Image (cartoon, helix red, strand yellow):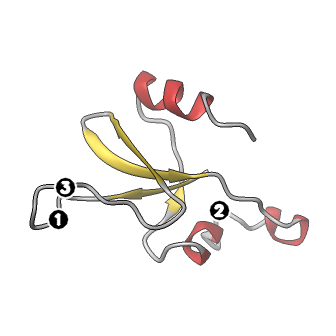
Amino acid sequence: MAVVKYDEDQNGFYVCPAGFDLGNVCGGHFCYRVVSVPDAKKSRMIDDNFCAEFEKDAMPAVIKCKEENDLIGKYKF
């Protein structure tokens, strides 16, 4: 799961990059996307930040609160 933190745009809206879904959790607005990691990259996916291949500011999701856990639990992996 890749996640990107987003702030409001100039119109007061939160817009996620293409392919990401908005989640309003843990007191913030975050964009989420399930990504498939090729076997060859799995051993270094966190250290090499594989998620940045989909969006430059994306990072692996880290569950910070119950709301986020519940939101991520709705995705099919």
Of tags 1 and 2, the one toward the viewer is: 1
Vertical comparison of 17 with 21: above or below: below
Q: Which of 15 and 70 is in front in this view?
A: 15
Label 1 with label 3: CB-CB less than 8 Å: yes
Look at mark 3 in the image and give the residue it sits on.
13
Alpha carbons under labels 1 and 2: distance apart:
29 Å
- Secondary structure beneath disc 2? loop
Name the residue located 17 percent from the left edge and 65 percent from the top edge: 9
Q: Give x and y (percent) for residue 40.
A: 89, 71
Near mark 2 (Cα within 10 A), the count class, few <14, some 14-19 or many ≥20, is: few
- Secondary structure beneath disc 3? loop
Label 3 with label 2: CB-CB less than 8 Å: no
Name the residue located 81 percent from the left edge and 63 percent from the top edge: 43
Look at mark 2 in the image and give the residue it sits on.
46
Vertical comparison of 77 with 9: above or below: above
Name the residue located 65 percent from the left edge and 70 percent from the top edge: 50
Of tags 3 and 2, the one toward the viewer is: 3
Name the residue located 51 percent from the left edge and 61 percent from the top edge: 59
Near mark 3 (Cα within 10 A), the count class, few <14, some 14-19 or many ≥20, is: few
- Secondary structure beneath disc 1? loop
Horizontal arrangement in the rendering, residue 44 relative to residue 62 (left or right): right
Q: Give x and y (percent) for residue 44.
A: 75, 67
**Numbered circle sitting on residue 9:** 1
Alpha carbons under labels 1 and 3: distance apart:
6 Å
For badge 1, the amino acid type reads Asp
For badge 3, the amino acid type reads Phe
Vertical comparison of 22 with 44: above or below: above
